[in-house]
Image: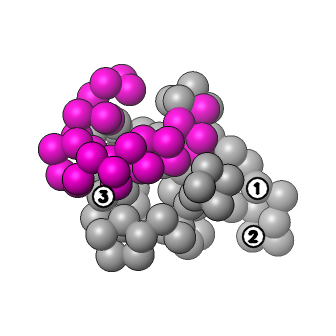
Amino acid sequence: MSLTILSILLYHLNVKDAKMMYKIYQCESANGTQLIHYNNDKRKTVDRGFWMYNSYWMKDISDDCSYDAVCSTKTAIKIFKKSGTKPWVCAKLIK
């Protein structure tokens, strides 16, 4: 799985950005082993999938896409190209 995600990132991004995004993926989902996180917030949101898409803030991203390595990674690339690494908590941890 990780090889697929890295390959997609390298295909769509320059090497530096691909490496950064891969580190974010590894941190966010524990390298694809933790695909769901229940938040203790007032909305009772859930972070889901390989890139931990929040059920409230990123509700336009379906569960099917969130849990699909290819779809979720292509979506992460679109988000990255629009907003940089800001949407991911782990971006602050790995710089």
Mark 2 or 1, which is nearer the eye? 1
Q: Quadrant of the N terminus?
A: top left
Residue type at tag 3: Ile
Magenta region:
1-30
Q: Is residue 39 above or below residue 69?
A: below
Q: Residue at x 82, y 71 (%)?
A: 42
Label 2 secondary element:
loop
Residue type at tag 1: Asn
**Residue 60 appears in which quarter of the rendering?**
bottom left
Which residue is under mark 2? Answer: 43
Q: Is residue 19 magenta?
A: yes
Which residue is under mark 3? Answer: 77
Labels 3 & 1 near each other (Cβ < 8 A): no
Q: Is residue 36 left or right of residue 39?
A: left
Q: Is residue 43 left or right of residue 35?
A: right
How far is mark 2 from mark 3, CA to CA?
Answer: 27 Å
Horizontal and vertical percent for residue 75?
A: 31, 57
Asked if residue 71 can be seen in this view, the reply is: no
Residue type at tag 2: Arg
Asked if residue 34 can be seen in this view, the reply is: yes
How many other residues sit within 10 Å of disc 2, few (<14), some (14-19) or many (≥20)? Answer: few
Q: Which label was assigned to residue 66?
A: none
Mark 2 or 3, which is nearer the eye? 3
Q: Which label was assigned to residue 39?
A: 1
Q: Residue at x 38, y 26 (%)?
A: 2
Label 3 secondary element:
helix
Labels 2 & 1 near each other (Cβ < 8 A): yes
**Majority secondary structure of the magenta segment?**
helix
How many other residues sit within 10 Å of disc 3, few (<14), some (14-19) or many (≥20)? Answer: many
Mark toward the start of the polypeptide (3 vs 1): 1
Horizontal and vertical percent for residue 94?
A: 61, 50
Horizontal and vertical percent for residue 38?
A: 73, 49
